[in-house]
Amino acid sequence: MILAAGVLELTESAEQMMVVWDDLFANLDDAHLDFVRGLISAISARRQVIVTTRDLRLGEWGACIDLEQAFRHLELSPQA
């Protein structure tokens, strides 16, 4: 995650990129999770950040969306 954040900073078009992290934080202790929260907060000042997780500690980080509930209402159009 730290490496990916560094690459984002070095990429010229990084400010236009959305960042998605999928459950990378479940194995972090609270001290490391606090560090990562600060890093993600800094990144989110310049671009959209989406974090998917089942870790309830992240619930206070921002707006939470219950994807299971959201996808229940998703209707896909048939392909042409």
Image (tube, rainbow, N blue to C red):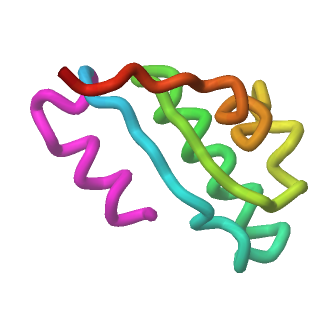
> With 63 as the anchor, is 79 left or right in this view?
left
List x then y, in percent, for residue 34. Answer: 76, 56
The foreground one among 1 and 73 is 73
List x then y, in percent, for residue 6. Answer: 31, 54
Tell me where residue 12 sits by quadrant.
top left
Residue at 52% x, 28% y: name it: 44
- Magenta stretch: includes residue 7: yes
> With 56 as the anchor, is 26 left or right in this view?
left
Residue at 39% x, 20% y: name it: 77
Question: Would you place residue 61 above or below residue 34 in this image?
Answer: above
Residue at 59% x, 45% y: name it: 51
The foreground one among 65 and 56 is 65
Question: Would you place residue 26 above or below residue 39 in this image?
Answer: below
> With 57 as the anchor, is 78 left or right in this view?
left
List x then y, in percent, for residue 65. Answer: 75, 31
Residue range (magenta): 1-15
Question: Would you place residue 16 above or below residue 66 in this image?
Answer: above
- Magenta stretch: includes residue 43: no
The foreground one among 54 and 25 is 54
Question: Would you place residue 74 above or below residue 58 in this image?
Answer: above
